[in-house]
């Protein structure tokens, strides 16, 4: 009980701190540039952050189990290519989108199945499926992008619903659904328990392998949904799309307070972290900071987040030992 209360307190405190950093970054950048705090730029930040939010929700579930999924970037590419190929073959937009989402979900399920059935390290499995998935994408296209889709499809990436874009609504819906599942359903509890003590969960009668497969399937689905947004936004299905997206997603999840050792996770923290990374990237671009310095800054943020997460884990463990 004491451990749970202490963990909850830490989670809320870290989210508040992250929110304050986000607010401070917005205030500073608005003072540096008069173009930052405009609706056009704010909408651009939100629109660019949607991909990270969508993928980050699925990655949060995976990392909660003490796992990782390096294949999400390749899934983004393959799912978009599946949609594009289907539409160019005469399939309607709706079924083509469902086909792409199904392809991404299947890859996620396969990841979970291999990891749970053979008890192989998730890093190794998803590294392999990343290469396989990217290879399939290149084979299907011959390395040549597929472009030219109907407005009914491109609307999902660059359409408008009043002042906002459809990807923003998708990201909001996925984030809300993810928060409900993680905090108020058995699957969410099992995801956290898998990272905390998988053996104890298994001995209590829970089908741990089945739940792990489902969780990786969720991650594959959210990656495929990001693939829909990317393909529709660019009006192009690119076999190299999604390159390095997995690292951005992992960075956002860890920065948002989810423990790499598993057992603790926060969808709201992930969303705040995605917005913070989006604000920082946008602000650095407005300030004309070269892209390689931006990559350096993001890398440092990841390292700091991991160090803080490790220190927080040790602090929690020490307090638990003291309480006992």
Image (spheres, grey):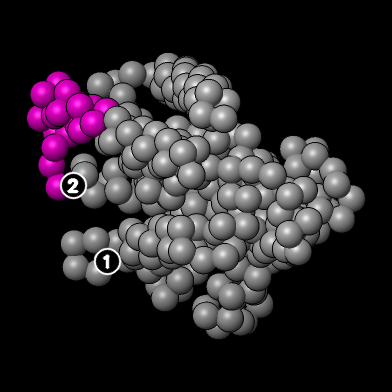
What is the x, y in percent for residue 3? 50, 38
Quadrant for residue 105, please give it.
Answer: bottom right
Q: 144 or 79, which lies in front? A: 79
What is the x, y in percent for residue 40? 18, 47
Question: Hey, which residue is sitting farthest front in the picture?
Answer: 324
Q: Which mark is residue 273?
A: none
Graded by Cα atoms within 10 Å as few (under 14), some (14 to 19) or many (20 or more), the crowding at tag 2 reads few
Residue 271: say if magenta.
Answer: no
Question: Hey, which residue is sitting farthest right in the picture?
Answer: 118
Up-down: is 95 above or below 242? below
The residue under the point 42% across, 36% down is 6
Up-down: is 222 above or below 143? below
Task: Tell me, yes or no, if residue 74 can be seen here.
Answer: no
270 sits to left or right of 194: left
Graded by Cα atoms within 10 Å as few (under 14), some (14 to 19) or many (20 or more), the crowding at tag 1 reads few
Q: Earlier in the sequence, mark 1 or mark 2?
A: 2
Q: Main secondary structure of the magenta part?
A: helix
Q: 24 or 231, which lies in front? A: 24
* Residue stretch in magenta: 20-40
Q: Which mark is residue 40?
A: 2
Q: 217 or 71, which lies in front? A: 217
Task: Tell me, yes or no, if residue 45 can be seen here.
Answer: yes
Quadrant for residue 108, please give it.
Answer: bottom right
Circle 1 is placed at which residue position?
A: 160
């Amino acid at each position: 009980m004491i451990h749970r209360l202490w963990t909850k307190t830490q989670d809320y405190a870290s989210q508040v701190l992250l929110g304050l950093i986000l607010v401070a970054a917005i205030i500073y950048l608005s003072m540096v540039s008069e173009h930052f705090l405009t609706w056009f730029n704010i909408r651009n930040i939100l629109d660019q952050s949607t991909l990270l939010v969508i993928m980050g929700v699925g990655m949060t579930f995976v990392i909660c189990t003490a796992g990782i999924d390096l294949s999400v970037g390749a899934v983004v590419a393959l799912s978009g290519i599946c949609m594009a190929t289907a539409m160019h073959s005469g399939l309607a937009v709706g079924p083509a989108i469902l086909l792409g989402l199904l392809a991404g979900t299947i890859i996620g399920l396969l990841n979970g199945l291999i990891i749970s059935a053979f008890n192989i390290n998730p890093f190794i499995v998803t590294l392999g499926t990343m290469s396989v998935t990217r290879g399939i994408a290149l084979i299907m296209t011959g390395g040549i992008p597929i472009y030219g889709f109907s407005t009914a499809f491109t609307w999902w990436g660059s359409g408008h619903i009043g002042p906002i874009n459809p990807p923003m609504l998708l990201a909001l819906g996925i984030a809300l659904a993810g928060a409900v599942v993680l905090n108020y359903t058995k699957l969410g509890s099992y995801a956290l328990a898998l990272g905390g003590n998988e053996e104890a969960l298994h001995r209590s009668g829970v089908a741990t392998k089945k739940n792990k497969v489902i969780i990786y399937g969720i991650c594959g689905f959210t990656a495929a949904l990001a693939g829909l947004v990317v393909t529709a936004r660019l009006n192009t299905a690119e076999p190299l799309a999604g390159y390095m997206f997995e690292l951005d997603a992992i960075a956002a999840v860890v920065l948002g307070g989810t423990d790499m050792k598993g057992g603790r996770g926060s969808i709201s923290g992930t969303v705040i972290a995605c917005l913070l990374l989006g604000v920082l990237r946008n602000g650095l671009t407005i300030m004309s900071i070269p892209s390689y310095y931006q990559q350096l800054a993001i890398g440092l943020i990841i390292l700091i987040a991991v160090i803080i997460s490790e220190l927080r884990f040790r602090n929690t463990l020490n307090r638990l030992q003291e309480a006992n």
